[in-house]
Amino acid sequence: MDISPVSLDIFEKSLYDIHANLKLFIKTLDEEKALLEKHEMEKLEEALATKKNVIDSMHTVSMECQTLLNNVNFPFNEKSILQIISAFNRSKQETLTALWQEIKNLLKLGDQKNLVNGILITTLKNYNDALLQICNLKPQDNTYSNQNNPYSPALSTREHKA
């Protein structure tokens, strides 16, 4: 593998930047969850702006890493990252391999936390929608009711066979 020392330095910095951004992203997700649980919507807007900045920063670093990999004709995937890590000296390989493993763990953790926050947001939205319907004196359609569905007999399965 023929990668210049400058490219290796840039790659190493990119990994550390990705790691730092992921840690910050997880911190913002934790703050977002706390604000959602406390219903502190005013502070939530500020937290969302911070989250957007972290996501933008992660995107920039990710694009830099992808460009670096493209320049050495590698796809942007784990196999390529591990190949580039193998171009470093032994001690750096161990350090960067551990860093890469932590990045993968942080990605999984961030995904889980983001999913939980999404569920919280959806739950709050549904709760607010229900409150608004009550306030506007509009009863919610009953999910299990046939009030709005006129009776229609079952169709023959013979007509639906292919």
Image (tube, rainbow, N blue to C red):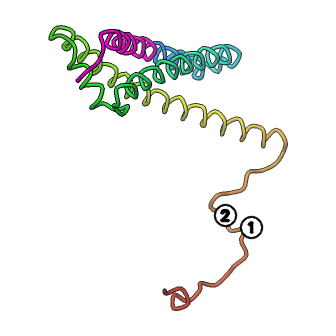
| Residue 119, picture quadrant | top right
Residue placed at 37% from the left, 28% from the top? Answer: 108
Decide if residue 127 is on the left or right side of residue 30.
Answer: right
**Disc 1 and disc 2 in contact, CB within 8 angstroms:** yes
Residue on which the image places disc 1:
148
The three-letter amino acid code for the residue at tag 2 is Ser
Decide if residue 5 is on the left or right side of residue 68.
Answer: left
Q: How many marks?
A: 2
On whether residue 2 falls in the magenta region, the answer is: yes
Instruction: Answer few, some or many: residues within 10 Å of disc 2's Cα (few below 14, many 20 plus, some between 14 and 19).
Output: few
Residue placed at 22% from the left, 13% from the top? Answer: 88
On whether residue 62 falls in the magenta region, the answer is: no
Decide if residue 29 is on the left or right side of residue 84.
Answer: right
Mark 2 lies on a secondary structure that is: loop
The residue positioned farthest toward the right in the image shown: 136
Is 34 situated above or below 119? above
Residue on which the image places disc 2:
145
Toward the viewer: 68 or 99?
68
Residue 109 location (% of width, % of height): 39, 25
Mark 1 lies on a secondary structure that is: loop
* Quadrant of the drawing holding the N terminus: top left
Real-space CA distance between mark 1 and mark 2, rounded to the nearest whole angstrom: 8 Å
Residue 62 location (% of width, % of height): 46, 23
Q: Which residues are magenta?
A: 1-23
| Residue 41, picture quadrant | top right
1 or 2: mark nearer the eye: 1
Is 36 situated above or below 88? below
Residue placed at 73% from the left, 67% from the top? Answer: 147
Residue 117 location (% of width, % of height): 53, 28
The three-letter amino acid code for the residue at tag 1 is Asn
Q: Most prominent secondary structure in the magenta stretch? A: helix
Residue placed at 81% from the left, 48% from the top? Answer: 138
